[in-house]
Amino acid sequence: MPQLKESVLDALKTEESRRAFLAKFASAVFAGLVAPAVAGEVAPVQAAAAEQSGLTDEFDATQLPEAVEGEHPIKRMMADLRRALQKPMEQRRWGMVIDLRKCTGCNGCNVACITENKLPPGVTYRPVMTETHGTYPNVARRFIPRPCMQCDNPPCTPVCPVNATWKRSDGIVVVDYDKCIGCRYCITACPYAARSFDSGYFYGDFEGGERQPYELLPSPEYGENRVRAEEGSPIGNVRKCHFCIHRIERGELPACTLSCMGRATYFGDLNDSKSLVSELIGQPNVMRLREEMGTEPKVFYLV
Amino acid sequence: MTSLKNIKVARRDFLKAAGASAGGIAALATLGSGFRPIDAAAQATLSQQGTRIAYTACVMCPAECSLAVKVENGVASAIYGNPHAPLNSGVVCAKGASGLQMVYNANRIKYPMIRVGARGEGKFKRVSWEEALDYIGEKLIKIKQQHGAESVIMDAGDVTDRDPYYYLFRAFGTPHTVEHGAICDTPRRHGPKLMFGGKRVEPDIMRPVLVRQPDGSLKNDYRYRTRLIVYAGWNPFTATRIVYESRGTVEAKLAGARLIVIDPAFSNTATKADQWIPIRPGTDPDLFAAVLRYILENHSDDDPFRRYIDWSFLQYSQGWEEFEAAFRSWWNKKDPINGLNYFSLEWAAERTGIEAEVIAELAHTFGITKPAAWVWGMNGIGHHYNGYTAAIIGTALNVITGNMETPGGAIDTELVKSDKGGKVKGDDFNKRDVTRVVNGKTVTGKQEELHMDLFGKWCAAWDDAVGDYPSRFLEGVELKYGPFRGHKYPIKAFIIRTGNPVITGSNTDAWIEALTAKDGDDYRVDLVVYIDTPFLETGLYADVILPEASYLERMSLSDIYPSHQLIYLRDFVLEKMYESKTQYDIAMALAHKLHEKGDSDIKPEDHWEKYPTEEDFWNEALKVAPGRTHCGYPLPYPQYPVNYKLLGTPDSLEEGSVTIDDEKKVIQGEPVTVQWLRTHHGVAVWPMSWGRFDNGGVLKTDSKKVDFVWDYTVEKDGEKQRKGGYAKYNKLIEAAGEPTPGLQELDWEKYPTTFYWFETLWNPYTNPDFARYKDEYPFQVISGRIHHAMSGTQMVDWLGRIPTEDLWMPLNDDRTVEEVIIGPDGPTPTGRKVYIPQQTWSIGVIQMNRADGEKLGLKTGDLVEMETPLGHKTSGKVYLVETIHPGVLRLPFGGGGRFSPGLGKTYDFRDVTPNANAIVDPDHHSPIMGSPIYGDMIVKVRKV
Ligand code: SF4
Ligand code: SF4
Ligand code: SF4
C-alpha cells in the first residue's frame, strides 16, 4: 500500500480532504490522525473553543488575558498557525526560528520532544549542542538546539533507495516507517546529523527490564498512533523531527516551541508575511546552519 | 490480620495500573483504618478512558512550576508547562518535562518496608501499612512518654506541600517540624529577612504580570523595564528555581538590560552576560562591601552622573545613619592579611582577585543604572560561613539605590507571594502550654519554647538548623534560653520526608555516624522513618520506609517566589501507584494510629473529623490566600481601601462579592477552594503592583519599615519595648547571660544592632587563621547545581544522558553492571546484567581550570583524589576547561558518590564520582543560623 501511506502523510491538506480521507479510510490507525478532537476525546469545552473543526486548544491558550501591548507568544503563534491551516497545504511553508541569544541551554525542548514523540533511548530529534570558545577568562559559549532543518533542498531524500522519505508540499520532510528499510543512507547524507536510527531499545532495558507505561503508549507521530514493539516499525527505521505535524495540523504548536524555557523557539508559516516567524527572519541577525551546502534550511537562528 | 488481604488487593491493583486498565480506587477503602478513598470530585478527574489534560504542579525541583499533564488512558504521557500560570507561562525545563520517568521509575518505593539488617545495610522487608504504622506509633508514644515529644524531629523536606506532616507533629507535641531550607541557603536569606521580614530578592522580570489599567481593565503586561541585572553567585538558568529568570533574563537583555554575572565558574547564566566577573570563592561580601563603599564615597546629589543614592528610601526605612556609621567605622581599619583599608577598592581587589578598576566600574554602573537589581544566590552566598554579610550589604545596595519595588527593579518575592497554609500549618499547637521538670523544678512554657535551635544553639535559626543535626543526635539537646533553660533531652526519632540529608545536609560521614551510633545494642536515635517516592541514601539508614505518592498522585498547593500573588493547585492526575499514599493519607493514618494507641494529644476533632477529605484540608490551607496587603501602584483594586488585607478568589474580589472589615482591615471575598482552582486551569492570579513598601505596605518588620537597625527600643503607651530582627534573641541571651556558640566563635556577646563584619572560614586569602594552608592545599572547592541532577532526580534516564555546565558530563567508562532495583523488600539484585557503553551517560565530574590541570600533569577524565586539611577525601574524574577560575574546583552538589541503588546509573558510577559533601567541615556551621558551610573548603589533589 505505498500509495496509501504516502497520502496519509500528505493528507491533512484541507478540511475537505481531511473529511473525505477519514470517510474513506476510517480505520483505527486513521482515527488517530484527527484525534483527539474528532474522536471526541478532548473535553468538549476545548473542542468548542476551536474556531475550525478538527482544531484543538489543549491548554485554552486563547483564553489568556489580553495584553497591554502585543500578545502572549503562544497565543500569537497559535493564531498564525490557524491562519495557515486555512490555506491549501502547498501554500504553507512551515519554518522555525530559534533565537540563540535567548536559548539558555536548558534542554527542556529536547526532553519535551522525547516525551511528545515517545522516542526510545538513543533517538533524539532536538539535541542542544554546546559550543565553547576562548581561554580563561575570555570565554564564550552558545547553545544550539538542532531539530531537523526541513531543508527545501534536502540531501537526505534522494539517497533513499525505496522512496521512504520525501518532502511534503508544505516543506516538512517526512519518513514513512512502513517503507523505510533501515539502510541508513539518509543518516549519512544529512549534513546536520538530524536523523537517527531506532535500534529497538526501551528505557526498561536499562532499568528494571520491563517496559515503562509511557513507552507502551502509541506515539502520535504522523498521526499514526503506532505502538512501538519488537520487530515492528519504527524499530529498525530512521527517525527524525517532523515539526510535530500531528500537533500543528490541529492548530497546536510543536512541543519544543510550546515548552521552550527561554521562549527562544518560534514556529509558523514563512509564507505568511504577518506571521511572527516571518517578522523574525526579516531581521538582519538571522542565519542558517551550513548555508554553503545549499540545503535551504527552514530552521533559522537569530544570533 | 488484615495485612495479607491488603497485599493481595494491592498487587492486583498494581498489575492493573501497570497494564493501564481500570484502577483500584475501591481497593483503597479496604486498606487500614486511617485511609479513606479520595473524594468524588477527585475521583471524577481520574478517568481511565481517553485523553485529557490535567493541571497540576511540578516537584522535580523546588520551583514547583504549574504544569499541564497529558493523560492517555490513565497513563501520563507528556508534561507541558501551564500557559495560565505567569510563573512559568507555559514553559517547562528538562526536569519538568521528564517527570514521567520519576513517576514511573522502576526504583520507586512501592510498599511500606521495615529494616531487617543493620542501618545502612539496605536490608528491608515488605510490610503492610498497618504494621508500619503500628511500629511508628508505638515508638513515638514510647519516646514521648520517656523523653517528651520534643525528642522527635519531623523534617518535611523541600516541597511546599508539607502541611499535613507539620500539622500532625505539632499536634503530637514537638516543635521540631523542619524544612529543607534550613540546610540550603539560610545565609543568603538573612539580609532580606532581617531588613524586610522577607527572604528572596529577585529582579522584576516575571512576565507577564497582570496589571490594573487606567481604564479599569486587568491586562497582562509583557514589558521589561529592567536596565541592569547583577547576579552574584546565582545561576538561575541552571538552578531553575526561580523559573521565570530564564526567559526573563534573556528577554530583559534583548529589551536593553545589561547583565553582569559574578561567579568563579562560567555558568550557563554567565554565557548570556555582557560581563562575566570571575571571583575568588567566599569573597562575595568583600566585593559587595567595596561596591557599597564606592557608592557612599562617590555619590553626589548634584552630579547626575554620580547620583547613585535615591534618598527617597529614607521615607520607608529606619536606622540608616547607624548602619552607615558602623559600615564607615571599618574604613580606617587595616586588614591584617594585606595591610589595606577595609572595603577600599585595593583591599577588595587583593581579596577577590578582581581588578580595582573593574570593581569601581561595577559599583558605578550599578549606582547609575536604574532600574536595576542586585541579586545574590545560593552557591555564592548561601554556602559560606560569612554569607550573612553579603546578604545584608546586597539588601542595602538595592534599597539605597532606590531599586526596591520600582518597576524593573528588585522585589522581595517572599513578601509578595500568596499566603497559604493558615490553620493547617498547626501553629496553634505550638502555642500550647506544656510543663517540664527542669533541674527538679516544674516549669511551664509554650510548646515552641522547647525548640532545640531557637532556644538552644542557634536562636536566630529562623528556619531551623538541620546541618547541625548530627551533633544533636549524638550529644542531645540542652536548652539554653527561655523558660525551659537547662532542660536536657535526647533526639530519639528522626522522620525525614522528601529529603536526603546524608548526601545534602552537611558532611556525609557525620550524618552516617549520627544515624548509626549505638548505646549498647540500641541505636541512639531510636526511630528513623524515611518517607518519599524515590529511594535515596538516607533511606538506607531508616527503620521504616513509607512510600509517598508521587507528585502526580497527590494534592497540595504551590506558590513559589513570584513577583505578585498567585497560587496553584497540585492535583490528582493519576491514581496512586502501588501502595503509595499521599501526605494527607499518611498523616491522617498516623494520627488515627496514635489516637488508637492512647495518645491524648491527638484528638479526632482536630484531625479526621475536622478535615474528613483531602480537599477539606487544602481548602483550609487556601482560606488565607492571597492574604497580602492591598497596596502599591497601580492599585490592584481601586474600589477597595489601601493597606487592608486581601482574602478570596480573584473573581470575587473583582466583582465586589466581598465584605470589608474596617476594624481588622480585611477585605474578604469568597475563599479560594480546590474546586475553584480546578475550574481555572489550576491557578489563581491576583494583580501586580509596585511601590509595595510605601507606608508599610507588604513589609513585615516590627517597624513596618526597612530596618537598618535590628535591636532598638521604642516607647509605646509609656512603656519601653525592644524591637527589631535580633531583639528577641538578644533578650533571651541577656536573660541567660550566655551567648550562642556561634556568637562565641565570633567573640560576640550578642547579635549586633546594625552592620557587622566577620571573615569566612578555611579561606587562606582572607582569613589569617587559615593563611598557612595556602601552599599545601591550593584549591578552593565550590559546588554548582545541575538542574538535571538534583539529589533526587538522578535516576531519570532522559536527564542522565544530557550533559550540563562542565559538571555533569558523559565521562562514564564502559561497564557492565549487575542491576539492583528497589523491590518490595528494598534494594534487590535482579540478576540482569546491564551494559553501559562509555561516554553515553553523564556523571558528576570535577571542573578544573585547564592550566591548573596541566601543571599537575592531568588530562580530562583522569581520576583524582581530593583531600582536605581535616583529612576528608573524595575522588572523581577531572574535567579540564577554560570556564573556571584558576585555583578553584567545582563539584556538582549531590551529583556524585551516590550509594543508593535507587539512583540507577548514577549509583553504578558512584566509585568515580565526587561527593561534594564528603569534604564539608562537619564541625563548623555558619555562626548566625547554623547552616552548613558547603562552599568553604580547601583541598590538595592527587592523581589515583
Ligand atoms: S536537516 Fe537533514 S534530515 Fe532534515 S531535511 Fe535537511 S538533510 Fe534531511
Ligand atoms: S518540532 Fe516536534 S519533532 Fe521537531 S524537535 Fe520540536 S518537538 Fe521534536
Ligand atoms: S528549551 Fe529553549 S532555552 Fe531550553 S535549550 Fe531548548 S531552545 Fe534553548
Image (spheres, coloured by chain):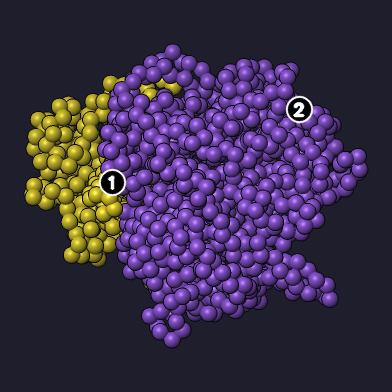
Q: Any mark on residue A100, and which?
A: none
Query: Callout 2: residue from which chain?
Result: B
Quarter of the image holding residue B146?
A: top right
Same subunit under labels 1 and 2?
A: yes
Residue name at image x 49 percent, y 36 percent: B869
- N-terminal of the two: label 1 or label 2? 2
Dot 2 alpha-carbon crowd within 10 angstroms: few under 14, some 14 to 19, many 20 or more: some
* Left or right of residue B735: residue A289: left
Q: Which chain is yellow?
A: A
Up the image or down, B642 lies above or below B543; here it is below
Query: Disc 1, disc 2: CB below 8 Å?
Result: no
Look at chain B in the picture and name its colour. Answer: purple
Q: Write down the chain letter for disc 1.
A: B
Q: Picture coordinates of residue B697 (x, y %)?
A: 62, 71
Residue B48 can be seen in this image: no
Report the amino acid beneath label 1: Glu
- Label 2 residue SS: helix
User: Horizontal and vertical percent for residue A257?
Assistant: 33, 51
In this image, B217 relative to A217: left or right?
Answer: right
Residue A228 pos. (x, y %): 33, 28
Quadrant where the N terminus of chain A lies? top left
Instruction: Give whichever of B198, B420 is nearer the camera.
Output: B198
> Three-letter amino acid code at disc 2?
Lys
User: On the image, numbered disc 1 is attached to which residue?
Assistant: B882
Q: Which residue is mark 2?
A: B139
Q: Looking at the image, which residue is at 48% across and 16% down? A: B829
- The answer as to whether callout 1 falls within 8 Å of ligand 3 is no
* Residue nearer the viewer, A161 or A143: A143
Of residues B382 and B551, the one nearer the viewer is B382
Q: Is residue B17 visible to the viewer in this orientation of the structure?
A: yes
